[in-house]
Structures are given as C-alpha cells and as structure tokens.
Image: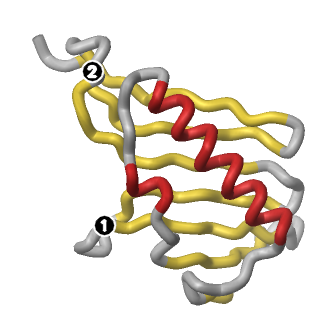
Amino acid sequence: MAVMNAAADTSSAESRRILRIREQMKQALAEADVALPGLDAAFADTESRNDPFDGSATLFCHWRDIHHNLRGSVQLHDSGRVYAEYDVLRTHPQRPAWFIEAVTVWGDDSGLRSELRLLPLPG
C-alpha cells in the first residue's frame, strides 16, 4: 500500500472526477441552503490501495479538520466508479426536525448521484 503526499499530482481524469464530485456535493447542499467551504480545501492526504482480489487500484483522498480528524473522503476506482462523503453535522435549515449527517456522491463517468444523509432529531 503506497501512501502519497497530499500535493502529489493526480491524472487529469482523476482531477476531473474530483472536480465533478465537489460540484455535485455543493449542488446537493445548495438545494438545502447549506454551504461548506471545506469542500474546496486541499486533501490532507491521499493513498492508493490495490484490491487483493483483482489487483485494481483505488485512490483514497481525505479531508481532515485542524485536529486531523477525518471530515470526508473520496474514492476513485480504476473502473471510473467513485464514492465520496463529507460530514455536514448540522440541523437541516429547511427541515428543522432533521439533522444532516453527511453529503454523499456516487457514480461513474456517465453520471453522478448525490444525497444528504439525514437523521431524525429526537423529539
């Protein structure tokens, strides 16, 4: 398992995927009137892992807070599939009975989907 510096170069295809993921997350959050400036931050670290079964590689990119706690991650698979999530951790501004735990994005080069992971607030 190789660990790469957060400033390590990514391929143009990976860079495009990361940009699309960030934009998809921002769109899902904007629909709920939430903005998270941390989504534009550089990744704290990146790591490439090979699947022990088929040998395919997945690039993992991580956002961390000032205390180095994990805030979110992006997974870019060799196949073009992606999965990402970022902690939101706030009450939904349009639905006060709900708490937004995270925003997630998944898909591939043909399209991305996103959703807010919601939890009901105790009432």
Where does the N terminus fall, quadrant-wise? bottom right
Residue sitting nearer the eye, 20 or 49? 20
- Above or below residue 65? Residue 108 is above
Dot 1 falls on a residue whose secondary structure is loop
In the image, is 7 to the left or to the right of 34? right
At a point 57% along the width and 88% down the height, the residue shown is: 5
> Picture coordinates of residue 106 (x, y %)?
68, 40
Q: Residue 4's image quarter? A: bottom right
Q: Which residue corresponds to the image point at 34% horizontal and 41% vertical from the top-left?
A: 88
Q: Which mark is residue 116?
A: none
Find residue 78 and report its horizontal and vertical position in percent.
Answer: 85, 63
Disc 2 and disc 1: Cα gap in Å? Answer: 23 Å
Q: Report crowding for label 2: few under 14, some 14 to 19, many 20 or more residues within 10 A (C-alpha).
A: few
Q: Which tag, 2 or 1, sits closer to the chain's start?
A: 1
State whether residue 109 is above or below residue 33: below
The answer to which of 79 and 28 lies nearer the viewer is 28
Question: Relative to the observer, which residue lies in front, 112 or 38?
Answer: 38
**What residue is pinned by disc 2?**
93
Which image quarter is the C terminus in? top left
Question: What residue sits right under mark 1 in the picture?
Answer: 65
| Amino acid type for the residue under numbered disc 2 | Pro
Q: Residue at x 53, y 29 (%)?
A: 28
- Closer to the observer: label 2 or label 1? 2
Location of residue 110 (image quadrant): top right
